[in-house]
């Protein structure tokens, strides 16, 4: 299936902001004690901050304006109370910040784990069309984006909403007329925020998409650095990256400009309300219908009203950005593997008889079948070679046998049982594949060998290395030798020998070699060929053949042509038929004669 970049950017399903937000809140349930403690501490701190202007009003009206010099002790007590209220509010803020940080870190750790575990479960078709950089971006930067939201963001939003509600009632209590005047500007503010919300969401979605493209291109450029250097394509790579980088820059600038405009406009609207209150309040003081202390307290509250509104606006900004990231994370977590594992049947003993019966497979509904009506029987403990031109379907056959993909027409039977009925993990434990790309994980030689059998001892590892001919170079370097990313500190032949050792250390009954010797040097191929009979002994082996020596040593050869079984027989039988294999031999294998 071929997809455009825009198609790859689309998510599997659409999520509403409310759905995403409620689901994120669900993660706090397992941490409700810590979350509640932080919320209560922040709530109490907010209440105390609302008390301070009332203390200020009493001090002005009862002591400062009347100039009650004889009652300075009472003013001093009020001042001390004002300070203590602020100090307790500060301590409560510290407690809240501590617990909210703990909560946020725990939650993103859990979400990242869920995403990574799902990536382990997803089938190969997901990775066929998802760029590695985009996947990495989702479980790193996208998850990290949620930290502020899940730590302080949600609690701040709840508390600030409560703060505004309580503040409204206090303002009404202080002076209804001034409160009504202040409410004049609120519809203007509300209309501005609603308009801003629509624009900001679109801007942040575009920012996240362009950033994912930049991250993806980073990964591809680094992985393919050898190719770009070999073709002197550095300028081309830089131009392509510059285009993506500019797109991300422009998208991010549009989002940031929106927020750069938002806060000054909000300040201006609130300043208008303050000016109106100051004017009317001054007139009311002159008419002796309002006290100075009440006006000062009212203005103090107005000064404080901007902070929760700003914080709620910041929260909305963070929420928009986080919802775009959350959507991409849940898109991974919610995906269903196309290969559905079953737990009902485990392999106890295995003979190794394999049958492909009327097998037909296409990688998508929109493409033609890669394999059509494929039928072969493989007896236990025999070696079958699959040959054919590029694109004939050889690797697809082995991928289906490993259940990297699921087929929907026909069957693959192992010892008479449909492989789809087996427990997937247990089934794959009985199969090992040695790919053409000799991939090693960064780490030590021992680490890479233990992927095949985590419980293996050094003595077992040494025995396996002797069998595949890798003992000498491993002993020279040592088990703790760091192989580098993808094994770059080892030669191609050394990497392939380690892949052979890793594949057979678990003693699989079925062994698949996907052109495993096609990219090694002649000496390494000779080492592998000499040890091949020990490697495949008492196993059913399926080998995608690239070398003449492999084809000749096979018990039977199956020739594929355009996804169909064209010929089958021994080496000499197929040559005598003078068909597809004979032609393939003349074009591909004959030149390998010594």
Image: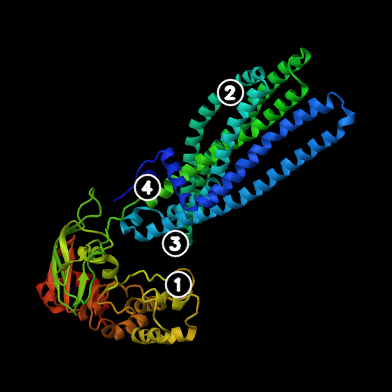
How far apart marks 4 and 2 lie (CA) works out to 43 Å
Q: Residue at label 2?
A: 186
Q: Secondary structure at mark 3?
A: helix
In the rendered image, residue 58, in percent from the top left (x then y), is placed at 76, 29
Q: Name the front one of labels 2 and 1.
A: 2
In the rendered image, residue 41, in percent from the top left (x then y), is placed at 61, 45
Mark earlier in primary sequence (2, 1) = 2
Q: Residue at label 1?
A: 487
Q: Residue at label 4?
A: 8
Residue 115 versus residue 63 in the image, above or below: below
Mark earlier in primary sequence (2, 3) = 2
Mark earlier in primary sequence (4, 2) = 4
Q: Residue at label 3?
A: 227
Q: Are marks 4 and 2 in contact (CB under 8 Å)?
A: no
Mark earlier in primary sequence (1, 4) = 4
Label 3 environment density (alpha carbons within 10 Å; few <14, some 14–19, many ≥20): few
How far apart marks 2 and 1 lie (CA) works out to 63 Å
In the rendered image, residue 233, in percent from the top left (x then y), is placed at 48, 56
- Seen as rendered, the residue at the extreme right is 70
How far apart marks 2 and 3 lie (CA) works out to 60 Å
Q: Are marks 1 and 4 in contact (CB under 8 Å)?
A: no
The quadrant holding residue 558 is: bottom left
Label 2 environment density (alpha carbons within 10 Å; few <14, some 14–19, many ≥20): some
Is residue 344 visible to the viewer in this orientation of the structure?
A: yes
Q: Nearer the viewer, residue 18 or 437?
A: 18
């Amino acid at each position: 299936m071929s997809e455009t970049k825009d198609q790859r950017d689309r998510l599997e399903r659409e999520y509403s902001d409310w759905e995403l937000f409620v689901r994120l809140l669900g993660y706090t349930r397992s941490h409700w004690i810590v979350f509640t403690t932080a919320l209560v501490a922040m709530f109490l701190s907010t209440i105390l901050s609302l008390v301070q202007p009332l203390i200020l009003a009493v001090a002005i009206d009862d002591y400062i304006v009347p100039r009650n010099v004889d009652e300075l002790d009472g003013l001093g007590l009020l001042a001390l109370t004002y300070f203590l209220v602020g100090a307790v509010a500060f301590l409560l803020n510290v407690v809240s910040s501590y617990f909210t940080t703990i909560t946020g870190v725990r939650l993103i750790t859990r979400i990242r784990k869920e995403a990574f575990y799902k990536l382990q479960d997803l089938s190969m078709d997901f990775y066929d069309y998802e760029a590695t950089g985009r996947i990495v971006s989702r479980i790193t930067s996208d998850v990290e984006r949620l930290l502020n939201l899940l730590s302080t963001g949600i609690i701040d939003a709840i508390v600030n909403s409560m703060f505004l509600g309580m503040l409204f009632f206090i303002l009404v209590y202080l002076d209804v007329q001034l409160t009504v005047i202040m409410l004049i500007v609120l519809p203007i503010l509300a209309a501005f925020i609603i308009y801003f919300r629509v624009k900001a969401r679109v801007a942040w979605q575009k920012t996240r998409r362009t950033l994912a493209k930049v991250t993806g291109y980073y990964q591809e450029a680094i992985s393919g650095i050898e190719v770009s250097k070999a073709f002197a394509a550095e300028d081309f790579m830089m131009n392509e990256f510059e285009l993506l980088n500019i797109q991300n820059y422009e998208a991010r600038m549009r989002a940031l400009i929106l927020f750069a405009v938002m806060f000054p406009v909000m300040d201006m609207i609130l300043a208008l309300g303050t000016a109106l209150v100051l004017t009317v309040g001054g007139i009311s003081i002159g008419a002796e219908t309002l006290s100075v202390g009440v006006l000062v307290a009212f203005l103090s509250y107005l000064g404080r009203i901007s902070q929760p509104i700003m914080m709620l606006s910041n929260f909305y900004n963070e929420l928009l950005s986080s919802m775009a990231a959350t959507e991409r994370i849940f898109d991974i977590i919610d995906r269903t593997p196309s290969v559905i594992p079953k737990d009902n049947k485990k392999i106890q003993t295995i003979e190794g008889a394999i049958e492909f019966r009327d097998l037909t497979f296409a990688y998508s509904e929109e493409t033609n079948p890669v394999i059509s009506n494929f039928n072969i029987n493989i007896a236990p403990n025999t070696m079958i070679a699959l040959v054919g031109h590029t694109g004939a379907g050889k690797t697809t056959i082995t991928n289906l046998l490993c259940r990297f993909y699921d087929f929907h027409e026909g069957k693959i039977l192992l010892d008479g049982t449909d492989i789809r009925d087996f427990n997937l993990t247990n089934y794959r434990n009985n199969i090992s594949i040695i790919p053409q790309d000799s991939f090693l994980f960064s780490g030590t030689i021992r680490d890479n060998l233990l992927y095949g059998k985590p419980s293996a001892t050094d003595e077992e590892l040494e025995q396996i290395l002797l069998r595949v001919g890798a003992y000498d170079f491993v002993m020279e370097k040592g088990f703790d030798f760091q192989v580098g990313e993808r094994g770059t500190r080892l030669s191609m032949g050394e990497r392939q020998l380690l892949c052979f050792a890793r594949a057979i250390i678990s003693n699989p009954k079925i062994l698949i070699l996907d052109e495993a010797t096609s990219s090694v040097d002649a000496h390494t191929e000779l080492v592998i060929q000499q040890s091949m009979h020990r490697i495949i002994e008492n196993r059913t082996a399926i080998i995608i053949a690239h070398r003449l020596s492999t084809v000749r040593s096979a018990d039977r050869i199956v020739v594929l042509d355009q996804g169909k079984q064209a010929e089958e027989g021994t080496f000499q039988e197929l040559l005598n038929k003078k068909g597809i294999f004979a032609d393939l031999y003349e074009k591909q294998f004959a030149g390998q004669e010594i």
